[in-house]
Amino acid sequence: MCLSVVWFMNRLFLARVRLNFGLFSDDGKIHTATLYKLLTSVSNSKDAISRFIWDNCAPPRVQFFAWLLTNDRIQHKCNLKKKVLDDSTCDVCGGAEETVDHLIFRCPHACNFWHALGFRLGDGTQVLNLDQLGRPSRVPAEQFGAFILLCCWQLWKQRNGHVFRQEPISLQRTLQACKTEATLWGARAPKGCRGIGTRWCEVFFHFNVNHDETKCCKMFSHYPGRLGPS
């Protein structure tokens, strides 16, 4: 198919999307609220991971991030290597390719984080199975899915801060960032969920104070990366 035909078909598709869904304004800017409604409307209600992502009190931007995450569409280095990068090595640990599963579960920093919160990750733990993570006893059952999304969101944000702004990365900083985020989510949550932010803060505060990161890092001392005790 020649380029002119491809261009025409793309323009036709965008015109239909704009007409049917109001996804774009007249100046070409995308309406994120409309995009969010479109994604939630087309998600399969019988799909467990879709229900896990959309049916909770997490902010829409985080739900959209989780949708990208579980579909392997976030801009981690393995995805970018296909387009612009020559090296896909994780910038946090320096010991493996930065895949979506490595970023969220396999990187020593991520392992330390989940371990500190009481999660037990198996060799087969994958982002695609976020909805199957077992709940630690100290984590509230209410809005557990949103709690998982908050954790993934902060792992991603901490990674980005380290990669793009050379910010130090550590377990304590990540737990504190989660606590701060939980406070904001609690204040903006639906009326029936307002108290959940405070309960989450107690979880993050407890592990931030009582967890020995040095001991946890020794679990991964065999890992040939750069991450170590802060």
Image (cartoon, rainbow, N blue to C red):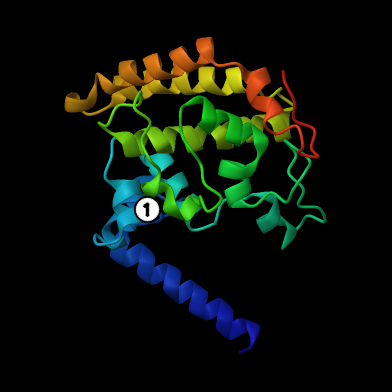
- Callout 1: SS: helix
* Residue 70 can be seen in this image: yes
Could you tell me which quadrant the C terminus lies in?
top right
* Residue 28 can be seen in this image: no
> Three-letter amino acid code at disc 1?
Leu
Q: Residue 112: x percent and y percent?
A: 59, 30
Q: Residue 168: x percent and y percent?
A: 71, 22
Q: Residue at x 78, y 55 (%)?
A: 85
Q: Is residue 223 above or below residue 13?
A: above
Q: Residue 138: x percent and y percent?
A: 35, 23
- Mark 1 surroundings: few (<14), some (14-19) or many (≥20) residues within 10 A: some
Locate residue 2 relative to residue 17 in the image: left or right: right
Q: Residue at x 49, y 36 (%)?
A: 153
Q: Residue 137: x percent and y percent?
A: 34, 27
Count of numbered marks:
1
Question: Residue farthest to the bottom?
Answer: 1
Could you tell me which quadrant the N terminus lies in?
bottom right
Residue 95's image quarter?
top right
Residue 3's image quarter?
bottom right
Question: Residue farthest to the top?
Answer: 209
> As rendered, which of 175 and 61 lies closer to the eye?
175
Q: Is residue 24 above or below residue 216?
A: below
> As rendered, which of 76 and 130 lies closer to the eye?
130
Residue 26's image quarter?
bottom left
Q: Which residue is mark 1?
A: 35
Q: Residue at x 37, y 63 (%)?
A: 18
Q: Is residue 189 above or below residue 94?
A: above
Locate residue 197 relative to residue 163 in the image: left or right: left
